[in-house]
Image (cartoon, rainbow, N blue to C red):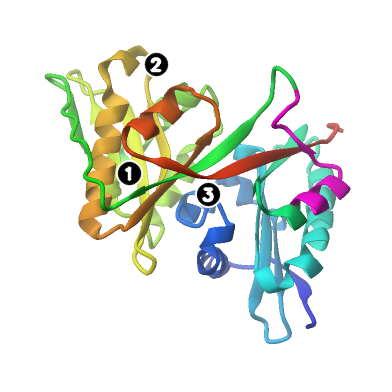
Amino acid sequence: MTILQYAYSNEMEKLEMTGLARRFAADHLHAGDLPYRLSSWGLDDPNNIRLWRDENRQLVAWAALQSPFWAIDITCQPGVEAQLYPEILAWADQRARAVSGSGFGRPAWFINVLSGQAERIRDLEKAGFQNQADVGEDSWSKVLMRRSVQTSVKEYRSRSGFIARSLAGEGEIESYVELHQVVFESKNMTLEWRKRTLTHPEYRPDLDIVVVSPDGRLVAFCICWFDLESKAGQVEPLGCHPDFTHLGLGRVALSQGLRRLQALGAENIFVETDNYRNTAFQLYESFDFEVIQDVWVYRKDYGEK
């Protein structure tokens, strides 16, 4: 099979990218929430995306440098992965070096793989990436979790004066971005990124949930994504302002999101989170999410110019 690389050229190709990932969702961590990830400012430079097409111009693989996440997203059709994955990594390496020192550059890039993807792991290690699961104090690994529709969702009500509701459109984006930046202690979330999520064809306002304090501030959020064809939902992102975590408002937002996904017909709901017993892991576990896959985090360092 002849497969050639192509530059990214237009927004319609992002729909192709999402479609490819979802056709092989079992091999990919971010099939459900790609409308969120592919709206990021990391892709404002089209050179940060690369496509691979067969002789019929059908998309068989793609890669993207996701600067906000310090991550390289890769989707590849299983039948051509043995042929293409090293080539994809070579492109990613070249691109990571090209953006070093720019606003898109990062001193280290990460690629997440399922623990059973032995061929990918071999290719990553040959390309100079190192597993972060056992590197001492900064060890890092993740899990993919799932909950079934067969399990009813626990309902959590807001404290008096707090209201859980849908985001009030573009008028609340600035407040949301401020909250997101505080929760994740990062400026990576931007107004432009968040606005793009609202205009994506798969965005559903009813799955964009916020909790509002008695004085009108946004203090927690849970955004969910739903793929009608596979009837799968995904949670990304979820957070609560540190001044309000003792009130259980993250639980309120998550409960709302899960209930709404079930009402839409979601049969399985997924979330990716860190593999240590932190607050997020315990929260998802309390909502009957179960670990279905271990996720290894691979890292490669790049010096800034």
**In the image: residue 138, left or right of residue 258:** right
Q: Do residues under tags 1 and 2 come within 8 Å of each other at their CB atoms? A: no
User: Does label 1 or label 2 sit earlier along the sequence?
Assistant: 1
Q: Nearer the viewer, mark 1 or mark 2?
A: 2
Residue 122 falls within the magenta-colored stretch: yes
Residue 220 at x, y percent in the picture: 32, 28
Residue 73 at x, y percent in the picture: 64, 51
Q: Nearer the viewer, mark 1 or mark 3?
A: 3
> Which residue is located at x 66 percent, y 42 percent?
71
Q: Residues within 10 Å of mark 1 (few under 14, many from 20)?
A: some
Q: CA distance from mark 3 to mark 2?
A: 24 Å
> Which residue is located at x 23 percent, y 27 percent?
212
Q: Splitting the image into 4 quarters, where does residue 68 fall? A: top right
Q: State which region is magenta.
A: 121-135
Specify the quadrant that holds the N terminus: bottom right
**In the image: residue 230, left or right of residue 57:** left
Query: Three-letter amino acid code at disc 1?
Result: Glu
Residue 50 at x, y percent in the picture: 71, 62
Residue 86 at x, y percent in the picture: 82, 59
Would residue 218 be visible to someone looking at this image? Answer: no
In the image shown, does 203 or 85 lie closer to the viewer?
A: 85
**In the image: residue 245, left or right of residue 75:** left
Residue 88 falls within the magenta-colored stretch: no
Q: Which mark is residue 242?
A: 2
- Compared to residue 223, the image places residue 122 above or below, namely below
Q: Name the residue that disc number 3 marks.
A: 37
In the image shown, does 186 or 237 lie closer to the viewer?
A: 237
Query: Three-letter amino acid code at disc 3?
Result: Arg
Q: Residue furthest left?
A: 160
In the image shown, does 211 or 147 lie closer to the viewer?
A: 147
Q: CA distance from mark 1 to mark 2?
A: 24 Å
